[in-house]
Image: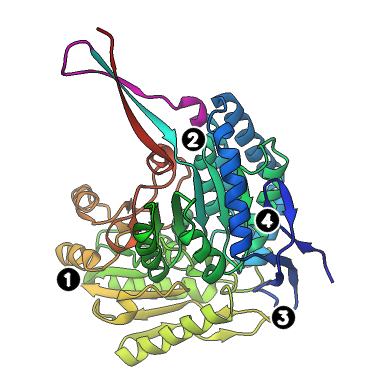
Amino acid sequence: MDDIKANFIGGEWVAGHDAAPNVNPSDTSDIVGLYARGGSAEVDQAVAAAERAFAAWSRTTPQQRHDVLKTIGDEILTRRDELGRLLSREEGKTLAEGLGEVGRAGQIFLFFAGEALRSGGEVIASTRPGLGIEVTREALGVIGMITPWNFPIAIPAWKIAPALAYGNCVVLKPADLVPGCAHALAEIIARSGLPAGVFNLVMGPGSTVGQAMVDHPRIVAISFTGSVATGRRIAKACTASVPLKKVQLEMGGKNPLVVLDDADLDLAVECAVNGTFFSTGQRCTASSRLIVTAGIHDRFVAATARRLAALVVDHALKPATQIGPVVDEGQLQQDLSYVSLGQTEGAQLVCGGQVLNRDTAGFYLAPALFTEADNRMRIAREEIFGPVGVVIRVGDYDEALAVANDTEFGLSAGICTSSLKYASHFKRNAETGLVMVNTATAGIDYHVPFGGRKGSSYGAREQGRAAVEFYTTVKTAYTFAG
Ligand code: UN1
């Protein structure tokens, strides 16, 4: 039996009560490792350690915080190949995608190393004589982070890095399915010079570890990325708890990619294939609705179907692979049930949607494309989170925009067009946090705000300079100087 990878609490590696195997979705006979599972006792210990560490950490100099974050970022980038392999092995995205994600995680730590040095405030004249006002930002305290399986290192990085940069302490619970990258990140953080207790890792299921974090009275804020149903439950619990918790939620999407008659066809197909199917469609930014005007519709569908048929779906670590497996059996069953639902609802399955057998036993699904879909169908309204594209035919730009916005979600929206007029109008009128012109709805930069509107996101934006909003609280200080 392998060594059990332990939780990291108060600067020590602590075994859980229990351990679970981390299974490779490309090859279920390959066990990545055995990972400890904690419970509410471990969450209590982690929060206590983080609280003890907070007073000193929140008063460290920006230089100290910069140096720690830079050390973490540098090690991630130096070990990019090894960590990228681990990521692809445990999550199933292709090696190129795994390497890209690890690079992103490293750069996020370097970005926030810089931000630690740049934090400042404002001095504002009072409306009353003799008074001066300073507006400054302070760390919150102990922050709980609950992260999903689809970005096992980038999402933990974009929550942890700003939290530490602004002087907070952290308890991280990574997705139970993919603890490997979070554990590797904890090892890197453990030797970065960060004082004991500032960062803690408690692995395990959301129903126990996540719940204990959400219920914990000494956790002051929760940042969560995951499903809508869980996000809503977390928001309720955070606003019902005493004291109230600050909460940030990044949840689902049903992101539209509009393709207009005047689009560059090759570019539009590229955007659709990348946005809808890369990372096996398992991105909250995936273009799961392809809204196509009538004049280009048939050419677009034919070219996209040809591209899909040629994509190599196989083991994530094989160099030729373009689409890795679905993450696990449960997700595969969900994808398959939407493929059959789409047919029942009357959409036409143009290609894909069937389970594929490969040399290794994994969860392989042929990328599926539906046409003749109506925006009222469930396949056009619910997030599938798999390699399933849904084409909706529309008459013109106005109808395309109306359909694009007719959704409970609002994360990302894209348009492929050569018209400046339509591109500009779409940028202003898409009801989303991200808007993409002639580029895929998924795949974002690490140094700018990320987040959505409506049912996709709640609370302050993540990433870039916007991250300061969630990870600090504002203090307005008045001084009477006579
Ligand atoms: C991306 O599209 O590059 O869970 C990032 C997700 C998002 C991140 C998407 N929070 O898919």
Circle 1: residue type: Gly
**Label 1: element kind:** loop
Is there a contact, CB below 8 Å, between mark 4 and mark 3? no
x and y percentages locating residue 108 in the rendered image: 54, 42
Q: Quadrant of residue 20?
A: bottom right
Dot label at residue 395? 1
Drawn side of residue 336 relative to residue 63, left or right: left
Residue corresponding to mark 3: 359
Report the span colored magenta.
115-130
Q: Mark 1, mark 4: which one is toward the viewer?
A: 4
Residue corresponding to mark 4: 183
**Label 2: element kind:** loop
Other residues around mark 4 within 10 Å, as few (<14) / some (14–19) / many (≥20): many
x and y percentages locating residue 135 in the rendered image: 32, 26
Question: Which of marks 1 and 3 precedes in the sequence?
Answer: 3
Circle 3: residue type: Asp
Question: Which of marks 4 and 2 precedes in the sequence?
Answer: 2
Residue corresponding to mark 2: 166
